[in-house]
Image (cartoon, rainbow, N blue to C red):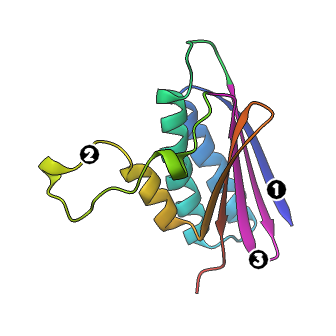
Amino acid sequence: MSTLTLNVKNDLTELIRVAEAIETHGEARGWPMKWIMNANLSLDELITNIVSYGYADTDEHEIRITLTEQEETLVIVLEDDGIAFDPLSQAPDPDLDASVEDRRIGGLGVYFVKSLMDEVSYERRDGWNRITLTQRPPS
């Protein structure tokens, strides 16, 4: 079992550090490239949303990220102390059959994350949003 824990600020420049840390850690432990890519793409989308929309102030906040390989499964936990927001229920899936002009703004990124990961869940615990992403071994 291997774990990578990152604490980052609510600043989009932190995305580079997150991506580099995941790539370095994952490659050193022989993670499938699919895990590394899906983790980075999903976290990029979710952290961007947290930084862009998750806080009612301009103060510095901490975003916690934990990636754990357990029993050949990658589990990613993303936590922030922003406004309570469940992206799974509050960001409905986009209408992919609608024309681009007729589509509602928003929701595509969360849909993208759900399509990359095998499981995605949300809970609010002790004033923190907690999103858990699960990626099973590639087939």
Examine the image and state in which quarter residue 3 appears. Answer: bottom right
Q: Which residue is mark 3?
A: 72
Q: Residue at x 58, y 47 (%)?
A: 19
Which quarter of the rendering shows the C terminus? bottom right
Residue 104 circle label: 2
Q: Residue at x 65, y 16 (%)?
A: 60
- Majority secondary structure of magenta residues: strand
The location of residue 49, given as percent across then percent down, is: 49, 37
Q: Earlier in the sequence, mark 1 or mark 2?
A: 1
> Circle 3 — which element?
loop
Magenta-drawn stretch contains 74: yes
Q: Earlier in the sequence, mark 2 or mark 3?
A: 3
> Circle 1 — which element?
strand
Q: Residue at x 26, y 62 (%)?
A: 96
Residue 3 circle label: 1
Residue neighbourhood size for the residue with mark 3, other residues' Cα within 10 Å, grouped as few (<14), some (14–19), many (≥20): few
Question: Which stretch appears magenta?
Answer: 62-82
Determine whether 125 is above or below 120 in the image: above
The location of residue 12, given as percent across then percent down, is: 51, 30
Kind of residue sitting beneath label 2: Arg
Which quarter of the rendering shows the N terminus? bottom right
- Left or right: 107 as drawn, with respect to 124: left
Determine whether 42 is above or below 75 in the image: above
Q: Determine the residue located farthest toward the right in the rendered image.
A: 1
Kind of residue sitting beneath label 1: Thr
Numbered disc in front, either 1 or 2:
2
